[in-house]
Amino acid sequence: MKIRPVDKNSISDMIRRQLLDIIAAQYAEGNYKLPPEQELADQLRVSRNTLRPVLSQMAAEGIILRKHGMGTFINPEALAVCVNLQEMIDFSSIIERCGHTSSHEIYALEEEPAGEEAARKLRIAPGDTVLRMEYWIYADGIPAIVAEGWCRRDIFQEKPGKEVWENGFAFEVLDRCAGRKVQSDRVRVESVTAESMHKALGHRTRLRCASVLLLDSIGFDRHEEPVVWGKAYFDTSLIHFDLFRVDHSD
């Protein structure tokens, strides 16, 4: 397998993608042992210090297993995980990893004064102008996710139009149009009834389930400033998450 040098932009993300490609190729060949760190760093043309945090994160997620005195190995059980709850991935990728074709539409895009909860989550004053967007995401044409998000209006010089939001999810638009890349998020997970969801949204949706999984998250930029607050409601008959856990006590 030819390994391409890594561009310096978004270097950790690119290293991770390259490593996942390497892992997939080696796994397909039945080779579970990864090359030593220095050899991987040389192939990717990055420093070992740059590579090491990416490997540590992948080890924490259980994608790779470090065995003292033996080396680093691919974990086939973790590779069987379709959607890892620890990952920050867009809605279309979630749906596609669950074996469906993804499509989406913008149900709402509007400016509004921030309520108390939005102001607290985004660290702004109540009444400050926020942009509220609502996506409906489909799996093979069936409603699967309803996502509602708020971000500060003043981070944009010009308000992105509906066509911009239709061509990308919130994280992409914030990065491209406001220069605010979401690099981490804090997520609360709970189960709620569909009726509770409809009440919170202020209207009925097309989700067909009686209860949904709610991911309530705040996305932060590299300065740990909140950029976006969102709620995503999942029909778990279509979409599910996995979590591979590792005991790091030894």
Image: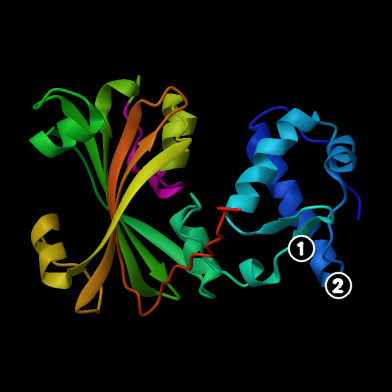
- State the residue in front, 40 or 210: 40
Question: Of helix, strand and loop, which one carries label 1?
Answer: helix
* Span shown in magenta: 159-170
- State the residue in front, 30 or 162: 30
Question: Label 2 neighbourhood size at 10 Å, few (<14), some (14-19), many (20+)?
Answer: few
Q: Specify the color scheme.
A: rainbow
Residue 114: horizontal and vertical position, in percent? Answer: 13, 32
The residue positioned 69% from the left and 40% from the top of the image is 14
Residue 20: horizontal and vertical position, in percent? Answer: 72, 54
Q: Can residue 202 be seen in this view?
A: no
Q: Is residue 195 above or below residue 174?
A: below
The quarter of the picture where residue 77 lies is bottom right
Position of 12 with respect to 241 (left or right) is right
Q: Is residue 236 visible?
A: yes
The residue positioned 27% from the left and 21% from the top of the image is 154
User: What distance separates the C-alpha of mark 2 from that of mark 1?
Assistant: 10 Å
Mark 2 or mark 1, earlier in chain: 1
Q: Which numbered circle lies on residue 46?
A: none
Residue 41: horizontal and vertical position, in percent? Answer: 84, 37
The residue positioned 11% from the left and 70% from the top of the image is 195
Q: Is residue 99 above or below residue 10?
A: below
The quarter of the picture where residue 121 lies is top left
Marker count (numbered): 2
Position of 94 with respect to 234 (left or right) is right
Residue 150: horizontal and vertical position, in percent? Answer: 25, 39
- State the residue in front, 185 or 55: 55
Q: Name the residue under label 1.
A: 24
Q: Which numbered circle lies on residue 30?
A: 2
Position of 71 with respect to 157 (left or right) is right
Please state which amino acid type lies under the numbered disc 1: Ala
